[in-house]
Image (spheres, rainbow, N blue to C red):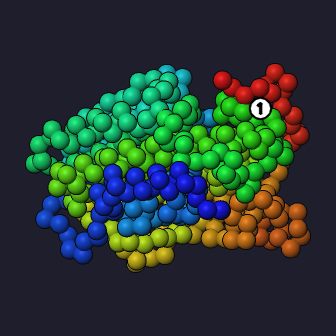
Amino acid sequence: MGAAPRTRREFLRTAAVTAGATAAAPAALTKPAKRRPNILFFFTDDQRADTIHALGNDTIITPNLDRLARGGFAFDNTYCLGANCGAVCLPSRNMLLSGRAYFRFTGSVGRRKRMYASPDKPNLADALKAAGYETYHHGKSGNTARLIHKRFDHTKYVEHHNKLKNGEPGKVVVDDAIAFLKSRKRHRPFFLYLAISEPHDLRIPAKKYLDPYRREDVPLPPNYMPRHPFDNGEMVIRDEKLEAWPRTKAAVRRHLHEYYGMITGLDHHFGRLVRTLRELGQYDETIIIFSSDNGLAVGSHGLMGKQSVYEHSAKVPLVLAGPGVPKGRSAALAYLMDIFPTVCELIGAPVPEGLDGRSLAPVIRGEAPGVRETLFSSYRASQRSVRNARWKLIRYPLIHRTQLFDLQADPHETRDLSGRPEHAERIAGLTAELRRWQKDLGDTQPLTAPKRLPAEWSPPEARQKPRK
């Protein structure tokens, strides 16, 4: 990456003045606090894992998240387990708050069967209320965990969240959260779960968030392709219709420019919220968690959406900072649903039985390098994957196709090694591990469909133009 444009330096200088130390990560405490810490959980929508400057993205501008990451504990391999619908955020947010894989869900709302976690089973809202917390939720109104939201003391929605065009991503939620913090009584610690609806499209950031970037300088993803080389089972879903085929370099840069502008805007409002905690004297008493519900392709592998098990779409950022959380960084394999038991252990509350998520507290405390040796991902009936510390296998049951990637040498999944004879034993071992995961989670999808579908695919002529 070349030298930063002058506008970018000016933006960072301004951000340092307006946010400054007020957005620094909370210092770790070596002794337990007299009462349980507050918890602020800032949860975004469709934010890739590689969109925080301090964690390796030299282009994006995120000064407030940078301070959080540099002073807190970051997980480099955190995943949304997968989805049984195209709106990946729906099962993702239900898994997050329930601590259970979506294969476990038995409730239903209208026609959306098996997508909502039951509020009558353990959930994060109930667990924290039982631990003495005042619980507050505010966020997107659709494709979310509405049944569990009812268990919060306070819950509200940003209606028509995808139609907001004020250019200020996250502002509505942050404004209300600040008002809540200033008005509430402090006899109980708080748990704020802010389920933001950005940087999900429509992406219309204010000019002040776009101007620090020069569109022509925004680098393409290392795995950029004009189109995906085969049918992955979800080639013309709405996310993919956001741009025409083939995906040109200019079009992908435009999408990335707007995507980065949205994240820079989110970072600004996140900084306002953290500054409020300092002004109220509650900053050093608050654990801050930052993550997102799923990633996004934005041109990677010729895709635009999150409907795949590639790293760019399945992996999300995860940073924790605050009392009891040291500075650090880990490559441990983690799920979003691990956050539920992790929070319980960090605050000294009981971890409910029956969760699929595992507490990451031993990793944070330096007691263990990880809590699992392999990790499973899935998307509807068309995609399954399993990975360990180095190797990743992807299986496409509907077209009888397998991919194998060496994530250590090829983190962007650009070289499929499945056709090499020397990897046959490795593929067999990973496939066996994939089947074990399926059995453990109740996933009944065969890895080879009875009738093989063609892998070849061409964009329908009627869908060549990008969605408006």
Q: Which residue is mark 1?
A: 244
Please name whichever residue, 403 or 191, is drawn nearer the observer in this view of the structure. 191
**111 to 15, vertically: above or below:** above
Viewed as shown, does residue 329 lie left or right of 231?
left
**Residue 242 visible in the current orientation:** yes
Secondary structure under tag 1 reads loop
x and y, in percent, of residue 41 in the image? 35, 49
User: Where on the picture, by quarter, is residue 153?
Assistant: top left
Quarter placement of the C terminus:
top right
**201 to 6, vertically: above or below:** above
Residue at x 54%, y 41% (from the top left corner): 210
Residue at x 29%, y 70% (from the top left corner): 28
Please name whichever residue, 131 or 253, is drawn nearer the observer in this view of the structure. 253
Residue at x 61%, y 62% (from the top left corner): 3
Q: How many marks?
A: 1
Residue at x 88%, y 68% (from the top left corner): 420
Please name whichever residue, 401 or 416, is drawn nearer the observer in this view of the structure. 416
Viewed as shown, does residue 7 lie left or right of 271?
right
Viewed as shown, does residue 359 lie left or right of 425?
left
x and y, in percent, of residue 109 in the image? 46, 25
x and y, in percent, of residue 118 in the image? 40, 37
- Dot 1 amino acid type: Ala
Looking at the image, the residue that sits furthest to the bottom is: 367
Neighbor class of circle 1 (other Cα within 10 Å; few <14, some 14-19, many 20+) is some
Viewed as shown, does residue 390 lie left or right of 417?
left
x and y, in percent, of residue 111 in the image? 54, 23
